[in-house]
Image: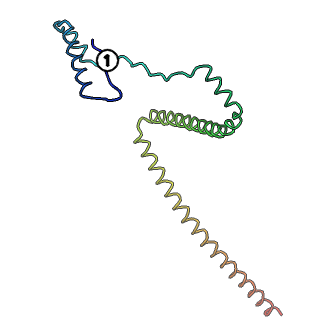
Amino acid sequence: MNDIKIDYDNINVADIMKQIQADDVVFENSIPEESPSPEDNQASSEPSLQIPEPEYLPMVSSKKKRILLKLMKPFSPLIKLLILPVHQELRQTVHSLDYTNRRLDYTNKRLDSAVIRYGCLDITMEYVKLLHSLCHNIVVELTKLKIEEEGMRIKLRIIEKDFELLSRKEKALEKKVFK
């Protein structure tokens, strides 16, 4: 194999492409040709199942790390002061989300058990509609009864006043007759 030579001061793409093509021709001529087997065709048509290795960033040497930590040490109270409220808010948010997820799971379990218990959600919905109309009719009838009761009370007060008036007239007539 020939090494590809690149002049980084004056990059010439056409020259690099010629070197790559020449290298490919030399590489193709050096491989002995074999008849491909059916197993090779199946293996080449399937995608590779290998997971590529992650690219790691270069690690900071321990000496540089120690120097950076010593430089940051006077600023650690300030860093903690700035990070603490964010940390507390993050913890509260995570706690709230956890509680909400638990309630959703509990509600889903109850709903699943209710669907299983009643067999079908449509029947349950029909019952809900019937109960709603029943409650509506009860409210209408109670309203009518309340209005009727108020009317009866008013009539009773009128009758009481008439009775008082008649009793006063009766007493007045008795006084005139028996004097």
Q: Dividing the image into 4 quarters, which one contains the C terminus?
A: bottom right
Question: Which of 163 and 65 lies nearest the eye of the viewer?
Answer: 65
User: Where is residue 19, by image quadrant?
Assistant: top left
Three-letter code, disc 1: Ser
Q: Residue at x 78, y 92 (%)?
A: 177
x 27%, y 13%: residue: 2
Q: In the picture, residue 68 is in which quadrant?
A: top right
Residue closer to the observer: 160 or 68 = 68
Q: Position of residue 139 (x, y in %)?
A: 53, 59
Asked if 163 appears above or below 143 in the picture, the reply is below
Q: Is residue 86 left or right of residue 19?
A: right
Judge from the rendering whether residue 98 lies leftward or rightward of residue 26; answer left or right.
right
Give the labeled residue for mark 1: 48
> Callout 1 environment at 10 Å: few (<14), some (14 to 19), or many (20+)?
few
Split into 4 quadrants, where in the image is the N terminus? top left
106 or 15: which is nearer to us? 15
Going by the image, does 124 lie left or right of 103? left
User: How far across and how far down the image is residue 55, in percent?
Assistant: 44, 22
Question: Residue 33 at x, y = what percent?
Answer: 17, 7
Q: In the image, residue 93 lies at what x, y percent?
A: 59, 39
Q: Is residue 99 above or below residue 3?
A: below
Q: Is residue 150 above or below residue 118?
A: below
Q: Secondary structure at mark 1?
A: loop
Farthest left residue? 35
Which residue appears farthest toward the right when viewing the image? 179
Q: Image point 21% across, 8% down: which residue?
A: 31
Closer to the camera, 166 or 21? 21
What color scheme is it? rainbow
